[in-house]
Image (cartoon, helix red, strand yellow):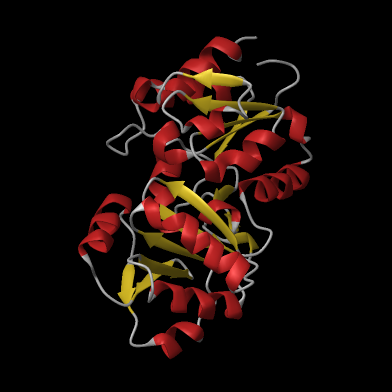
Amino acid sequence: MGAEYKMVISDLDGTLLDDTCEIPGLNKEIIAQFRKQGGLFTLATGRNSYSVKRFARELDLDLPLIIYNGAKIVHAVSGEDIFSSCMDKRDIEQALELYREFPLDPIFFSEGTGYVFEFTDKVKIFQRRDGIRLALLENEADLMKREITKVLAIGESQYYPEFRRQFYEVRGCKGHLVQSEINFLEILPEGVNKGTAMKFLADSLGIKLNEIVCFGDNSNDAEMIQMAGLGVVMENAHEEIKAYADIIAPPNTASGVGIVIRDYFLNK
């Protein structure tokens, strides 16, 4: 491993996972070798703890995991919260009003469960893909009684710019809006992103930011890619995120994470 880098943090979807949402065998093999020679490895994802735990088990991870795009950091084995942030109630109220104006299907995450007002086709597809637990909300009052970690809205990206304008400029909301996939628009607590979570984790482990390598593929990875000592962006990534890259990796379908770790850090 290069002397200046001690830890690798990787996004999941579109990065470590292939297009079937599985970890390619080469990625598993190289990550195991990397850890055997003393490297630290963990994940930073928009998924919740229930959805990410099988990947953590497959890789036998023992470092804390960054989930909900940075709104939580949890113990890899026990799932216990190490860091947690919740959304402002006013932002949730304003978001509810906007969801009545835009054709987006929201999922509200609280305490490891996703809550919906309706099991639409888009919601069902998401539930099957991520393997998460979803529950039906009776009404908005039921929602407002809960501490919400993040909101994920599923829909066409053509609506996102105007949603963003309404959220920030018209309604004065403070939450952090981020597009995590082409059809996912997420609202996180104010000041929360993968980069802030990475810094919290690094400080707790006694690691400097310039000793970290980060892999990502989408705008929700931008902060950690920029803050890390080495930012690696996948070839399949959106063009705007590639502008932040120190290295462009092969695509997620070609085990790009494993290839970069092997070529740059194994036995170095």
Q: Residue drawn at (32%, 68%), measured in percent from left and top?
A: 134
Position of the C terminus, as image quadrant, is top right
Q: Residue drawn at (52%, 17%), measured in percent from left and top?
A: 260
Q: Which residue ends up furthest to the left in the rendered image?
A: 121
- 160 or 196, which is in the foreground? 160
Q: Residue drawn at (76%, 29%), measured in percent from left and top?
A: 210
Q: Relative to 71, say whether 87 is above or below.
A: below
The answer to whether residue 112 is seen in the rendering is: yes
Residue 249: image location, x then y, percent: 49, 20
Position of the N terminus, as image quadrant, is top right
The image quadrant that residue 265 belongs to is top right
Residue 145: image location, x then y, percent: 50, 86
Residue 182: image location, x then y, percent: 38, 45
The mark total stands at 0
Q: Relative to 141, say whether 147 is above or below.
A: above
Residue 43: image location, x then y, percent: 53, 41
Q: Relative to 231, say whether 202 is above or below.
A: below
Left or right of 155, for residue 3: right
- 157 or 19, which is in the foreground? 157
Left or right of 244, for residue 112: left
The answer to whether residue 44 is seen in the rendering is: no
Q: Relative to 88, say whether 22 is above or below.
A: above
